Amino acid sequence: MSLVQWSESVRDLARRGGLRTVAVRAGRHGASGWIWDSTHVVTVEHILSPHVEVSVYTPEGKLLPAQVVGTHPGLDLALLRLESEVELVETRTRPTPSLEVGEFALAVARSGEDGLGVAGGLIACRSGAWTSCRGGRAEHFLQPDLQLYPGYSGGPLLDAEGHFLGINTRGLSRSQAITLTSETVAEVVAQLLAGRKEPAYLGTGLQTVHLPETYGRESGAMVVSLEPGSPAGRAGAHLGDILIELDGVSTAGTQEVLRELHLREAGQVVQTIWIRAGQEIQLEIELGQRPGE
């Protein structure tokens, strides 16, 4: 294949992907989105805020109002419902386990003003099970070696044959693009359509710290910030407290706390053990919901 032929192949791939890629506007913020079915669009959560109208520019250039069905802040995903149906172009989904590092991938995006946008690169990493910086749990994520420009978050990642691999976001990493896999996206969409409740929330900034041997534990999660009116703050947590146990589960650091919160819902009451000034204290906390959800 000549360079010209390869270039034309990539161009055609971008055009096909663009037939299911929309532009999403939420107030002054914008992102891309993937047409999930004829009345729903998947996009990123981090552009949304309460009481802001959301609209979608379709591939045909139509501007449609949209309603937020639900969000998953931990994985930076949101599901929108369109007020009218749109054309659904058939696109196959590729299972993540079949992907290999080094394969070519294409990120597709759309803006209402500038139309279609693309960025190409290689699959640099396919992770195992992980917990995002916002507390979301997933079996995998992909890391494509490409630049996600402003507005590209929420758009799809496609392989060289146009298969849907997942949704791109910059909302889960300050420095790198992350792709939430097709399996993760499908799971979240199913949960949101079923009326999934928001994951639990402590309202603390935590940092993993090592503990002296005298405590009988290697590490814990220290409170480095407390949001006003947070569930942990209302229960009596202070800056500098170190969380070592949540409902009988040892919390050796931030990731363990996020994992346990992801398994719980707002409104649940949990028993926690903390270290404060060298002494263990117990706090009963009613878990809350992240502000703005």
Image (spheres, rainbow, N blue to C red):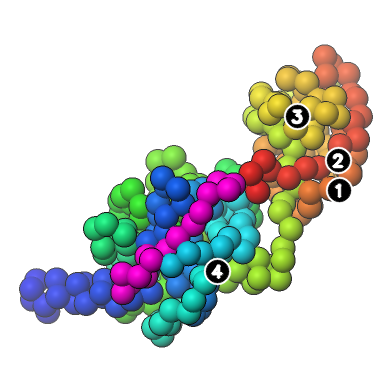
Asked if marks 1 and 3 touch (Cβ < 8 Å), the reply is no
- Residue numbers of the magenta segment: 49-63
The alpha-carbon separation of the residues under discs 3 and 2 comes to 12 Å
Kindly identify which numbered label has been placed on residue 229: 3
Q: Is 62 one of the magenta-colored residues?
A: yes
Indicate the secondary structure of the residue bearing disc 4: strand
Q: Looking at the image, is 233 positioned above or below residue 125?
A: above
| Mark nearer the viewer, 1 or 3 | 3
Give residue 209's mark. none
Nearest the viewer among 124 and 11 is 11
Q: Are marks 4 and 3 in contact (CB under 8 Å)?
A: no
User: Disc 1 and disc 2: Cα gap in Å?
Assistant: 6 Å
Q: Which residue is mark 4?
A: 81
User: Does residue 153 appear in the picture of this structure?
Assistant: no
Disc 4 to disc 2, C-alpha distance: 32 Å
Badge 4 or badge 2: first in the primary sequence: 4
Number of residues whose C-alpha sits closer than 10 Å to that of mark 3, classed few (under 14), some (14–19) or many (20 or more): few
Label 4: how many Cα within 10 Å (few below 14, some 14–19, many 20+) = many
Asked where in the image residue 106 lies, by quadrant, the reply is bottom left
Secondary structure under badge 3? loop
Q: Which residue is mark 2?
A: 286
Q: Is the residue under label 2 in contact with that under label 1 (CB below 8 Å)?
A: yes
Q: How far is the residue under mark 1 from the one under mark 4?
A: 29 Å
Of tags 4 and 3, the one toward the viewer is 4
Q: Position of residue 3 (x, y in %)?
A: 9, 71
- The reply, left or right, for residue 284 in relation to residue 149 is right
Q: Identify the disc placed on residue 268.
A: 1
Residue 58 percent location from the top left of the image: 37, 70
